Image (cartoon, rainbow, N blue to C red):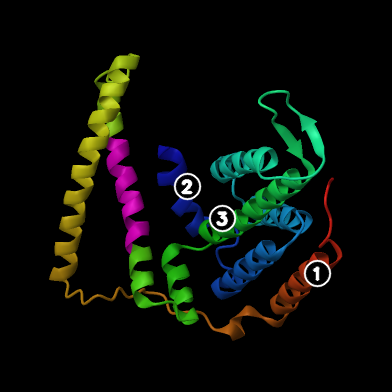
Amino acid sequence: MHSMFENTLDNYAHSNGLRETNTLFKVIFAITTMLVSLASTSPIVPLFITLVISFLLIFPAKIPWKFYLKFLAVPFFFGFLTFIFMALFFGVGAHILDLGIFNLAVTQDGFNRGLLLLSRVLGGFTCMAFLALTIPMTELFSELERFKIPQIVMELAMLMYRYIFLFLDEGINMYHAQETRLGYSSLKKSFKSMGMLGSNLFIRTWIKGEQAHIAMESRCYNGSIKTMKEPESMRTIGVRNLVLLTLFEVGLVIGLYFTGNFTLF
């Protein structure tokens, strides 16, 4: 937990191989690709998007593949669970597999719907991962301002992002303090230590939040958090990048048209 979120997530956003690429270009690429993934009616295009984004993150962006797989593990796990439930309980039609338990069976319709949902989850999340791992959040927020997102939404997003790391930092420090005192040497002690950590963590983060609010007010906070970086111009993207982006997205849309009725069963 310590190495994954504290030392890598935000660090990679500032030091990845695509760090100097135009921020607006990366935002447009990720958002348009995610919309195409969500609009797909077959799993082929979202899975293709997953492979392309994964390639970009592991090779040009130089994100370690082990960290990237860990980063994908949580959404994949929940997406796979949803796929199983849809395959077993939300389908109609011919049976692909009879489990022989409580009349449970995998149907063609349920399997295809579950696979489509799983592929959309992977395609959409890899696009979000591209944003999170290649763009520092302060720059991302400054770019999102040009899309006329309500100011209150931007403020909440920036504060939430800040307090995620504050929350993790407090939890990690408390966990290590308990660990050095043999707080997890047995199952009974582990449950007790985790309970104490959870209750104390809530109080500590509440106090930190109050202190941060006082500090902001003392610096003339008026309800608006300004970012240091100005949004980048569309002109700095470059003709070559715009052409490549257009060709890629058009290719995906053509793929949607030709694979719209594709099903495995």
Is residue 126 toward the left or the right of residue 205 in the image?
right
Q: x and y percent of residue 124 in the render?
A: 61, 58
Is residue 36 toward the left or the right of residue 77 in the image?
right
Is residue 253 toward the left or the right of residue 122 in the image?
right
Q: Which SS class for mark 1? A: helix
Disc sitting over residue 129 in the figure: 3
Where does the magenta region start and end? 159-173
Q: Quadrant of residue 160?
A: bottom left
Name the residue nearer the viewer: 88 or 172: 88
Disc with the residue nearer the chain's start (3 vs 1): 3
Disc with the residue nearer the chain's start (1 vs 2): 2
Q: Is residue 147 above or below residue 173?
A: below
Looking at the image, which residue is at 20% across and 50% down?
A: 206
Camera-nearest label, 3 or 2:
3
Task: Give the labeled residue for mark 2.
Answer: 8
Q: Quadrant of the C terminus?
A: top right
Disc sitting over residue 251 in the figure: 1
Looking at the image, which residue is at 48% across and 81% down?
A: 146
In this view of the protein, can residue 185 be seen by the observer? no
Q: Amino acid at mark 2?
A: Thr
